[in-house]
Amino acid sequence: MEQARNPHIFRLLSITILFFAGLAYGAIAMSSGNLFWFLSNAELSEPTRILIIDHGETTVITPEDIRFAALSEAVAESVSNIDNNDLIQIGLSDITLEDYRTNSVVMEIHYPRPISFNTPFRAGNPTKLLIPIEGRHAGTGVFFRGQREDWWFGGMRMADPTILDEALLEIGYSISVGQDRANNS
């Protein structure tokens, strides 16, 4: 005589959960173009140069400069830990860029190879970053991505910019609270 089979409800439930988890993972991986989107970090090479533009005057910091190592490590650590699940809906208008060149303090970091951001959204593969130090968007942890002469729409936010703030403070720059944060307070 045959014994009746017991339904394996836990096996069925496990397979269903795995199927939907795989489906969600695959959808996000396809839309972001990145299999490691869940890591929320960045893969950066060592920068070729760092520019600090201070009210129209540009300071170029290269690997030979004693300030370079501390700044590049602080930038890498700060921008590798992202605190947003989509691009922040802000861009850099021509007016903002002109303001950054003449009336603000910003830092541009240039890389020899494209940066790969592991995010659940398409962040592109920029070769340069712009971080406001004083002026619009400063003090919010927001940074912008770009390539060649272009800056792209959509900002990204550092989870913890304090390491970068401390490195900038050591070389004589302090992050000021930008208009965005002052208006939101």
Image: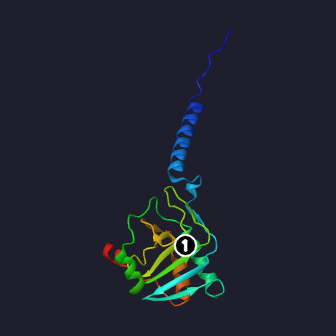
Location of the N terminus (image quadrant): top right
Total labels: the figure holds: 1
Residue at the image point whose x is 41% and y is 64% from the top: 88
Q: In x, y percent, where is residue 21?
A: 54, 43
Looking at the image, what colour scheme do you see?
Answer: rainbow
Residue at the image point whose x is 40% and y is 75% from the top: 137
Q: In x, y percent, where is residue 18?
A: 57, 39
81 shown above or below 94 = above
Q: In x, y percent, where is residue 93?
A: 36, 72
Q: Secondary structure at mark 1?
A: helix
Residue at the image point whose x is 31% and y is 75% from the top: 183
User: Could you tell whether 95 is left or right of 131 in the image?
Assistant: left
Residue furthest to the front: 149
Residue placed under numbered mark 1 in the picture: 78
Asked if one can make out residue 10 in the rendered structure from this viewpoint, the answer is: yes
9 shown above or below 100 = above
User: Could you tell whether 37 is left or right of 101 in the image?
Assistant: right
Q: Specify few, some or many for label 1: CA neighbours under 10 Å numbering under 14, 14-19, or 20 or more.
A: many
Residue type pointed to by label 1: Ser
Asked if one can make out residue 181 in the rendered structure from this viewpoint, the answer is: no
Location of the C terminus (image quadrant): bottom left
Residue furthest to the left: 183
State which quadrant residue 34 falls in.
Answer: bottom right
Residue furthest to the top: 1
User: Could you tell whether 181 is left or right of 7 in the image?
Assistant: left
